[in-house]
Image: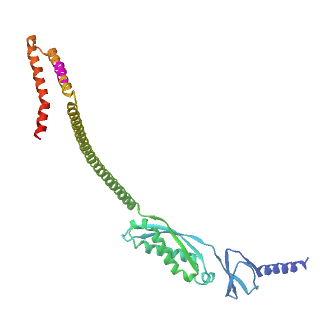
């Protein structure tokens, strides 16, 4: 029993020493190895052998992108208004050796540098612009931090402002200002709409009057053209009828036909007069009627003679 105790102790010490001789580095880490306190290299992911007592693991670094909150701090804008600003910084270790020996704690240094740069950038612009120019502020902070953190072996990938909180009285003033601005824009919009409505109505009335006048003009032109066409057709028809009548008179029996037509028309008209007249007609007037017919006969009989005389004169 006494012999087992020393052997057990030796075995335990041997296991501990053997355990310290080997190390497995995971894929997401970079391990700094020192030999007798001096940097000897960066262990890549995989299995590695260490010399007991001489070698040791000095630092372990996360090689993935890291996210760190930037605490709330009070900044003063260009127009002397205090605002509380916080944010998030994203960084990644690019050189494990510089991250180990270039600075004591790169995480705390990156956060403090982000705060300092953020105060500087907020102080360059007015309060109203801080809300609309967040992207520009973020880019400027990333650029400044990236330049300052290059000796630390890290790279700042991006920075995002989470909240910009002015004092309550400033918020109340901004709300009133925005409400007044919205009311102003609404009134301008309504006035513009009324103006455009009146313009459209006047344009519509003007166009309607023009269309009506043009329609009336075209109507009158069409009516005038119709009347002119009607008169022209009537004149042509009358001339054609007169020509045919004159041609018919020159034919044999034409004069007798004309006389007969005149007599028939006279009798017809005379009958109408007798029916509608209030004056009584005495039969003694028949002699005058006979004389009238004889006169018409003489007139009609003299027509061809006149035409013949004209032809002789010509």
Q: Residue at x 37, y 71 (%)?
A: 78
Name the foreground residue: 218 vs 107: 218
For residue 49, above or below residue 223? below
For residue 258, above or below residue 28? above
Left or right: residue 126 compared with residue 225? right
Residue 125 is inside the magenta segment: no
Q: Position of residue 26 (x, y in %)?
A: 71, 74
Count of numbered circles in the view? 0
Query: In the rendered view of the protein, which quadrant contains the C terminus?
Result: top left
Query: In the rendered view of the protein, which quadrant contains the N terminus?
Result: bottom right
Name the foreground residue: 11 vs 26: 26
Q: Residue at x 71, y 83 (%)?
A: 56
The quadrant in which residue 96 appears is bottom right
Name the foreground residue: 190 vs 99: 190
For residue 259, above or below residue 118? above
Question: What range is drawn magenta here?
Answer: 261-269
Q: Position of residue 15 (x, y in %)?
A: 81, 78
* Rendered image coloring scheme: rainbow
Q: Position of residue 186 (x, y in %)?
A: 34, 53
Residue sticking out furthest to the front:
312
Left or right: residue 144 compared with residue 79? right
The quadrant in which residue 93 appears is bottom right
The quadrant in which residue 119 appears is bottom left
Q: Residue at x 37, y 58 (%)?
A: 178
Q: Position of residue 281 (x, y in %)?
A: 10, 12
Name the foreground residue: 312 vs 10: 312
Magenta segment, prevailing SS (helix, strand or loop): helix
Residue 263 is inside the magenta segment: yes
């Amino acid at each position: 029993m006494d012999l087992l105790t020393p052997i057990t102790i030796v075995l335990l010490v041997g296991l501990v020493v053997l355990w310290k001789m080997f190390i497995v580095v995971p894929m997401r880490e970079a391990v700094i190895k020192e030999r007798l306190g001096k940097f000897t290299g960066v262990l890549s992911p995989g299995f590695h052998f260490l010399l007991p007592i001489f070698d040791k693991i000095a630092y372990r670094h996360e090689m993935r992108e890291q996210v760190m909150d930037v605490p709330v701090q009070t900044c003063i804008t260009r127009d002397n208004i205090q605002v509380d600003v916080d944010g998030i910084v994203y960084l990644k270790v690019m050189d494990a050796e510089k991250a180990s020996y270039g600075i004591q704690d790169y995480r705390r240094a990156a956060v403090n540098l982000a705060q300092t740069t953020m105060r500087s950038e907020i102080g360059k612009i007015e309060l109203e612009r801080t809300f609309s120019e967040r992207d520009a502020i973020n880019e400027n902070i990333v650029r400044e931090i990236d330049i300052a953190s290059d000796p630390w072996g890290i790279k700042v990938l991006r920075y995002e402002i989470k909240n910009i909180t002015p004092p309550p009285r400033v918020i109340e003033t901004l709300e009133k200002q925005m409400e007044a601005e919205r009311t102003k824009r609404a009134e301008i919009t309504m006035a513009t709409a009324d103006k455009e409505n009146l313009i459209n109505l006047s344009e519509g009335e003007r166009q309607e009057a023009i269309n009506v006048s043009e329609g009336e003009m075209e109507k009158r032109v069409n009516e005038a053209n119709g009347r002119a066409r009607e008169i022209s057709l009537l004149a042509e028809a009358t001339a054609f009828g007169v020509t045919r009548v004159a041609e018919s008179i020159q034919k044999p029996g034409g004069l007798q036909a004309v006389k007969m037509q005149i007599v028939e028309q006279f009798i017809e008209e005379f009958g109408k007069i007798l029916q509608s007249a209030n004056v009584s007609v005495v039969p003694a007037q028949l002699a005058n009627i006979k004389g009238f017919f004889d006169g018409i006969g003489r007139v009609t009989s003299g027509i061809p003679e006149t035409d013949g005389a004209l032809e002789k004169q010509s």
